[in-house]
Image (spheres, helix red, strand yellow):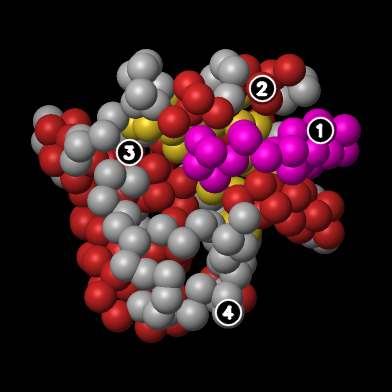
């Protein structure tokens, strides 16, 4: 399956959940497909994913049936996708706990969060915990229109999310969240490096990751380096 096909699969799953899922849907994944796709595909199958309501649509990339995702509180254990915790900052703490409990030292945990997560104290508690214990946890944060004066982040948090992570001694990087290859590369690198990492995927409201993926990958596909199994 190509990266473009993977993004399309995530979009299809998200749209299906919006139509068929139980409360609190409908929630759209549109605009987040690149972040979701790159996040899931940057992991090994033995790694765990702690998604939000939208990001659980990416479980289809692990061959999880869409119908299994309707109940967001049930999780999908065979696919190592945890139940959704509606409080994203608490999800970060759970990701730390899960990383501490893994018996496989090479396994990692990916936790999806949004920009508003930094408004909660648990965000800082989780960063501190991850840094203290050098946990193999990757926090993949998406943030919208950071430079826009009306951005919610500007009214909630002083500074960028990556800056807060670095203050705790956690390596962090900011990337273009609209480019699936950027997200995929960042997650792959973070997993290979070990230890806690924070990736800040910056997005622009209204951009279409699927359209950008076509533009981005047209010149390189069907090169085998850009295909996934």
**Cα–Cα gap, marks 2 and 4:** 32 Å
In percent of the image, x 20 and y 35: which residue is there? 207
Number of residues whose C-alpha sits closer than 10 Å to that of mark 1, classed few (under 14), some (14–19) or many (20 or more): some
Q: Is residue 80 left or right of residue 34?
A: right
**Cα–Cα gap, marks 4 and 1:** 29 Å
**Cα–Cα gap, marks 2 and 1:** 10 Å
Q: Is residue 68 left or right of residue 139?
A: left
Q: Where is the N terminus found, in terms of image quarters?
A: bottom left
Mark 2 lies on a secondary structure that is: helix
Q: Is residue 193 left or right of residue 176?
A: right
Magenta span of residues: 113-136
* Residue placed under numbered mark 2 in the picture: 164
* Residue placed under numbered mark 4 in the picture: 74
* Residue placed under numbered mark 1 in the picture: 128
Res. 51 in view:
yes
In percent of the image, x 34 and y 61: which residue is there? 27
Q: Is residue 129 magenta?
A: yes
Q: Where is residue 154 drawn, in percent x and y?
A: 48, 22
On residue 180, which mark appears?
3
Which marked residue is nearer to the observer: mark 3 or mark 2? 2
Q: Is residue 168 left or right of residue 207?
A: right
Q: Quadrant of residue 31?
A: top left
Vertical relation: 43 (above or below) 125: below
On residue 93, which mark appears?
none
The secondary structure that most of the magenta stretch takes on is: helix
Q: Where is residue 95 drawn, in percent x and y?
A: 71, 52
């Amino acid at each position: 399956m190509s990266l473009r096909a993977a993004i399309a699969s995530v979009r299809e799953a998200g749209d299906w959940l919006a139509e068929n899922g139980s409360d609190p849907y409908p929630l759209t994944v549109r605009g987040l497909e690149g972040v979701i796709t790159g996040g899931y595909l940057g992991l090994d199958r033995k790694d765990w994913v702690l998604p939000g309501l939208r990001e659980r649509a990416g479980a289809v990339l692990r061959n999880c049936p869409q119908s299994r995702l309707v109940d967001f509180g049930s999780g999908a254990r065979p696919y190592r996708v945890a139940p959704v915790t509606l409080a994203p900052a608490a999800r970060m703490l759970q990701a730390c706990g899960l990383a501490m409990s893994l018996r496989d030292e090479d396994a990692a945990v990916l936790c999806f969060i949004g920009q508003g997560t930094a408004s909660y104290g648990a965000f800082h508690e989780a960063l501190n915990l991850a840094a203290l214990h050098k946990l193999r946890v990757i926090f993949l944060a998406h943030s919208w229109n950071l430079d826009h004066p009306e951005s919610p982040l500007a009214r909630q948090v002083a500074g960028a999310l990556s800056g807060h992570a670095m203050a705790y001694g956690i390596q962090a990087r900011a990337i273009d969240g609209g480019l699936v290859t950027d997200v995929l590369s960042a997650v792959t690198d973070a997993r290979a490096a070990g230890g806690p990492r924070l990736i800040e995927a910056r997005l622009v409201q209204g951009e279409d990751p699927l359209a950008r993926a076509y533009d981005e990958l047209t010149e390189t596909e069907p090169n085998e380096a850009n295909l996934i199994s």
